[in-house]
Amino acid sequence: MGKVLGLWLLGILLCCGAQCDHHSKDHHHHIHDTDHQHEESELQCRKLMPANSDFAFSLYKQLNSLPDGESRNIFYSPLSISTALSVVALGAKGTTHDQLFETLGFSPSGLNETEVNHAFEHLFHMLSHKNNELQLEAGNVVYLQEGFKPNPTFLKDAQHFYDTKGYTVNFQKPDVAKEEINKYIAMKTHGKIVDLIKDLDSKAVMVLVNYMFFRGKWVKPFDPKYTKEDVFHVNENTRVPVEMMIRSGRFDYYYDEENSTSILMLPYKGDASLMLILPDEGKLKEVEEMLSKDSIKRWHDSLFFSSVDVYLPKFSVSASYSLKEILATMGIINAFSDNADFSRITEEIKLKLSKVKLRLWPLCLLRLDNLYN
């Protein structure tokens, strides 16, 4: 049996290219930083948009097709998964690398490894760009077995392109290693995730963790005095009591008559917005089936500054997925098998991925409050 790599993805930001996309209309303009370095970063990370978007919606359909997919909320971070698997791809060769790039959408988008790496480098630069109006932190950390010496080029590229920090632990003492990793992630997520890793394989030689943390303030906050007790219709058979936030104002809005769907953009202070998609009663399944990067782009481009009465329930959602089987279904097969080729990490021992775990905490897109999201 070969040595194993563990891959944990701690995702809090649902993103399929929106970080690099700016909405602008003649009748309504957003104000953005226009310095040259920011523009260069934007142009570079735009290269990832088609691939990340296609991967995001392909993964969404897989999650929605799970046995309990229709009965539970789907909450996931495509960017976290794409980022972490791209770091893994730095160490892959042959069919293992090809399957990663094909499934992540890079090869179909005509992107080679150099372009992908540079695009992620600029994306992380944008994500770490200081902004006093919103809090956004993202990065990767790799934990290596004491005494294991991977290819220096792999570590250098992971650090340079993907903002990856490196530490050593002793996986042969899994409880101690687990405590150290969880302590680091708790610090990076400001105490929101305190037990990301439940167990570790003593045969592990490397664990990679991706984390994202977002907190923003509404441009137009919901006044708490207008929040009231109400009922939210989960489906035709289920209703739950909620605190309903209420606000009237002018927002970017569009009603798609063809698909019976309302689209609303709620802006944060800083360069970010939340897109809400509200199907008409009984139309949820149809809208889910037609979701794609093209439909999102069409809705985004059709937004118009309009007067809107907004009723938004306070709610929070967390989720946890084991993605090994799902990613294999999507085409990443060799990485999990004895045929895995991670010889760009090391040629001294045979490595393969053992698990891919996604854990999301109800903080960003899906924890809505009067003043913060």
Image (tube, rainbow, N blue to C red):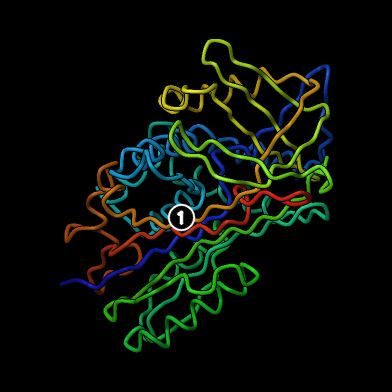
- The residue sitting at the top extreme is 258
Q: Is 103 situated left or right of 138 in this image?
A: left
Q: Residue 262 falls in which quadrant of the image?
A: top right
Q: What residue appears at the point 44 percent right and 57 percent down from the top-left corner?
A: 87
Q: Quadrant of the N terminus?
A: bottom left
Q: What residue appears at the point 70 percent right and 55 percent down from the top-left corner?
A: 215
Query: Of helix, strand and loop, which one carries label 1?
Result: strand
Q: How many marks?
A: 1
- Where does label 1 land, which residue? 319
Q: Is 47 situated left or right of 142 in this image?
A: right
Question: x and y percent of residue 173 in the render?
Answer: 35, 89
Q: Callout 1, which amino acid?
A: Ala
User: In the figure, 295 relative to 143: above or below?
Assistant: above
Q: Is 7 situated left or right of 231 in this image?
A: left
Q: Residues within 10 Å of mark 1 (few under 14, many from 20)?
A: some
Question: x and y percent of residue 97 in the render?
Answer: 32, 49
User: In the figure, 150 relative to 241: above or below?
Assistant: below
Q: What residue appears at the point 54 percent right and 24 percent down from the top-left corner?
A: 279
Q: Is 129 situated left or right of 331 in this image?
A: right
Question: x and y percent of residue 369 in the render?
Answer: 71, 50
